[in-house]
Image (cartoon, rainbow, N blue to C red):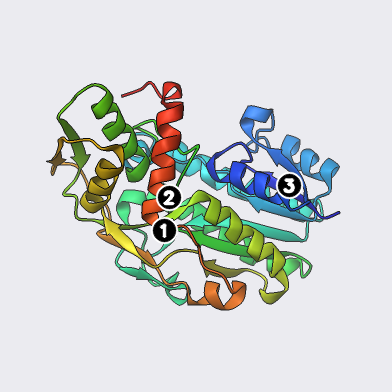
Amino acid sequence: MYKVLVTGGTGFLGKSVTRLLRNKDYMVETCSKSQGVDILDYEFFRDFVGNMEPDMIIHCAAHVGGIAYNALHPIEVFEDNVKIGINVIKAANEMGVKNLINVIPNCSYPGHLDEYEESKFWEGAIHESVLTYGLPRKMGWGLCFAYCQKNKNFKPVHLIFPNMYGPNDHFQIIRSHALGALIKKIVDAKDKNNDSVEIWGTGRPIREWIYVEDSAMAILKTIENFDNFEPNEIMNIGVTKGISVIDLANLIKEKVNWQGKFVLQTDKPDGAMKKVLIVNKMKEKLKWEPPTELEEGIEKTVKWYQENKHHYKDN
């Protein structure tokens, strides 16, 4: 049976990947700090990988947060993600793991671009607002490039995703991305009969969103079509459609059935003004596209948060 190790297996994406692969009869092990496996402890993690002997590692683990969290913890975010990437890739090579799927965020693309195509991955600097997160994740590609020069049996494939959303997302305001934060703020405002919700920035930035279960399916499709990839190849996964923050807020407002108004905090940073992935390669190689429309996904996510909001008490 094909054995897969999912790093960050108790996290947002990792949970969905683990559940899907187990349903497809893969033998899946997970590791995360909450399970007692600290990837930052290299020797411990290397031995964990060696004892499991996986056929593939799916690397979902990261020290992650939204733009506000990254601004508050830039050193920790940068250092941890560099170390996590190094330790996973190094352990895979030392322990003879031949196959790796490495998850990379779309903020690793050059900040001056509006549309992200794989051929433009190195055509400029990362946007300053996400540099401390995007650059360490991008460095994983570079380290894999180096290992591929020495280990011809090592085959990493890098999947670049837009912002994800769905059940089990970060809904703590400081840790969440815009969609999760907006759901929490709007649901909480309705519960407390508040008539206004603050939104960071101008509301104009355009972002692309992919439902987390579709992201997991993209990873499964990549495993099933792994022979179609070259070592260290990158591929975008996405829906090629963006939505402005204010339009996203209004869509969530409609699903929550809240009647209040939004107050734009224009002194707060917007980040890059547009981020949309071009996914022609995904369609060609996987013969697949993410099926969940944004409106449907938001409806499911709002319902999940309303049923689980007692776990998210912060403001």
Q: Identify which residue, 52 or 27, lies in the foreground.
A: 27
- Residue at x 43%, y 48% (from the top left corner): 133
- The C terminus sits in image quarter: top left
Q: Amino acid at mark 2?
A: Gly
Residue underneath mark 2: 297
Residue underneath mark 3: 22
Q: Identify which residue, 5 or 148, lies in the foreground.
A: 5
Mark 1 secondary-structure assignment: loop
For marks 2 and 1, give the CA distance: 6 Å
Task: State which quadrant residue 230 falls in.
Answer: bottom right
- Crowdedness near tag 1: few (<14), some (14–19) or many (≥20) residues, C-alpha within 10 Å: few
Q: Which mark is residue 311?
A: none
Q: Identify which residue, 34 or 192, lies in the foreground.
A: 192
Question: Quick check: 225 above or below 4?
Answer: below
Mark 2 in CB contact with mark 1 (< 8 angstroms): yes
Task: State which quadrant residue 115 falls in.
Answer: bottom left
- Crowdedness near tag 3: few (<14), some (14–19) or many (≥20) residues, C-alpha within 10 Å: few
Disc number lying in front (2 or 3):
2
Horizontal relation, residue 75 to residue 128: left or right? right
Specify which label sits upstream in the sequence, 2 or 3: 3
Location of residue 258 in the rendering, given as x and y in whole percent from the top left corner: 22, 35
Q: Identify which residue, 113 or 256, lies in the foreground.
A: 256
For marks 2 and 3, give the CA distance: 23 Å
Location of residue 273 in the rendering, given as x and y in whole percent from the top left corner: 24, 59
Residue underneath mark 1: 293
Task: State which quadrant residue 62 falls in.
Answer: top right
